[in-house]
Amino acid sequence: MNFQFDNVSHMLNMDGHGAYVWTAVVVTVLLMTWLIINPLLQGRNVFKEIAREVSREQLRQDAVKEGT
Amino acid sequence: MNWNWFYRMGSPRWFYESTSRWLPWLAALTFVLLAGGLVWGLAFAPQDAKQGNSFRIIYLHVPASFLALAGYFLMATAGAIGLIWKMKLSYMVMKCAAPLGAVLTFLALFTGAVWGKPTWGSYWVWDARVTSMLILLFLYLGVLALQYAFDSKDVGNKASAILALVGTVNIPIIYKSVDWWFTLHQPATIRFTEAPSMHPDMFQPLLVMILGFYCFYAVALILSVRVEILARERKTSWVRERVKQATQNTLGAGL
Amino acid sequence: MISNTGFWAFLRRDLLLINRRRGEVASPLIFFIMAATFVPLATTPDAELLKDIAPGIIWVMALLATLLSAESLFASDYQDGSLEQLLISPQLIVMPVLGKVTAHWLTTGLPLTLVSPLLGLLLSLPTDGYLPMMAGLAVGTGCLSLLAALGAALTVSLPKGGLLLTLIVMPLYMPVIIFGSATAQYSIQGLAWTGPLAILGAMLALAIALCPLAISSVLRLTTIN
């Protein structure tokens, strides 16, 4: 197993096929990252929403207790 | 035979809590496999004798195509399990598998097109496999569109599960027909098949990438199913308990 | 027990209903002819070029015409509640569904098949192609009707289901289109055209066996809820 290219610019160029290979790589990496980031962000939003609901209910319960 | 494990698996809470434990490990493994396989394939695998370096796209294209098709079957199976055993969790899996599979199918088509330019001389060729992939994308889009068309989530789930199942019956027929159609119209110049036996130096990184894509699929699917679970089970006490704990922890860290 | 009296009853009933509004039957047919007329205008009147693409054009137009008429398959029964009444019985309504689909085919697929020679004439289809094209259309539009009915059942409760119906059904049409137009193309090229026709027949048999089952369970799902 050897490194197939002379240097970095050779690897970027890939004997003229670099544009194709690297486009495919960049688009794939971007889309796959998005597939991971998107649920993480959504999950955080849902988590925050539930936390807000929970604390609102907590406040209401506390108020009822103080009232009695 | 004891079926308890099966019903326990259908419980969203069990799923959420057990995946919390091992998801980070799976994610780490995925990252290692994908990064390793990609570097191996892009920089260390020998170049193809005929296609030169453009063949390196195979390390993205083939795994994406694999997962696009496997994802459809997974989606349909989850839908069937939902229809038969009325499991909430399996509908959630089906719902999350649809956009994931559609993106992977698009990716397979995109990398295929980019690969086609230096190999066939054009971005789009009506090759049998390319055409079948395009139809697979249409099937995914149909399931997605149907899912969101209904006001009632329950009806939307069931309807798209049935559509996914009908699609599964159709996929082999579609593949065979498109294959037949292609041999009928095949221009002699563009026939392109991978070498029957790939050199092990080229094949090993491909295997790593395929494995990595499978793990990636699992991670992405589990992540979005977890979001779905949180959103649907927001009123239950176990979700509230978890949220309370998490907010207390972050408050403590902040103080 | 699934009685087959449901089949004839519903076939008769739907044909009677369709007979009352004949305009609806005529529209897909007129669309079929009109749209095909546009092809030479949009491309070329050259007979040599047209004859190669004629089977394909006729098939694509047949597909669109079937889809256009499919939306109304269960719509009126859904709106006036008779579909719900039918579904109250616990058994699968396979035979009534098959009767309704047959009525749909008799009023769209069959007329399309019968006027297709006219289109063949307009698109300069060689005379050898007429019989295979009609045979292919007769069998293939049966498949198209069954699949369209499945789409119609899935979207029957949606206020604007028509476009969605086309989206979900079209990918399923792919094999029928391939073998349907191949039947006519084979005969033009002087090959044995019974092969693709036999495959179309096999697809129709499979569709007749599976689609009504799927349609009746889908209807139960989309109407009762």
Image (cartoon, coloured by chain):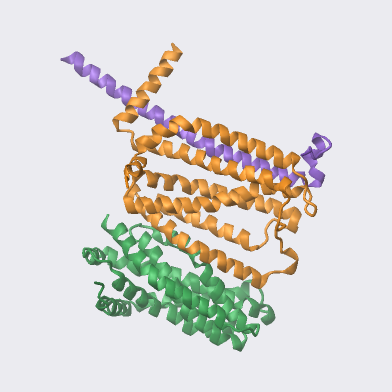
The outermost residue toward the bottom is C127
| Residue at the outermost left position | A68
Q: Nearer the viewer, residue B212 or C120?
A: B212
Q: Looking at this view, is B21 or A43 the one in front?
A: B21
Establish if B204 lies above or below B174.
Answer: above
C225 horizontally vs B16: left or right: left
Number of marks in the rendered image: 0
Q: Position of residue B46 (x, y in %)?
A: 77, 45
- Determine the residue positioned at 28% across, 64% down: C78
* Residue C168 visible in the current orientation: no
Residue, far right: A6
Residue closer to the observer: B12 or C64: B12
Q: Colour of chain A?
A: purple
Q: Is residue C39 left or right of residue C134?
A: right
Image location of residue C198, percent across then percent down: 51, 79
Question: What residue sits 40% from the left and 39% below the top?
Answer: B228
B216 lies left or right of B110: left
Placement of A61 over or under B79, stated as above or below: above
The hue of chain C in the figure is green
Depicted C155 relative to depicted C95: above or below: above
Observer-nearest of B178 and C43: B178
The orange-coloured chain is labelled: B
Residue C188: x and y in percent read 63, 83
Instruction: Kindly tell me whether residue B41 is visible in this rendering.
Output: yes
Instruction: Say which quarter of the image contains residue B11.
Output: top left
Residue B218 position, x and y percent, is 50, 41
Q: Residue at x 35, y 69 (%)?
A: C212
Q: Which quarter of the figure has residue B255?
A: top left
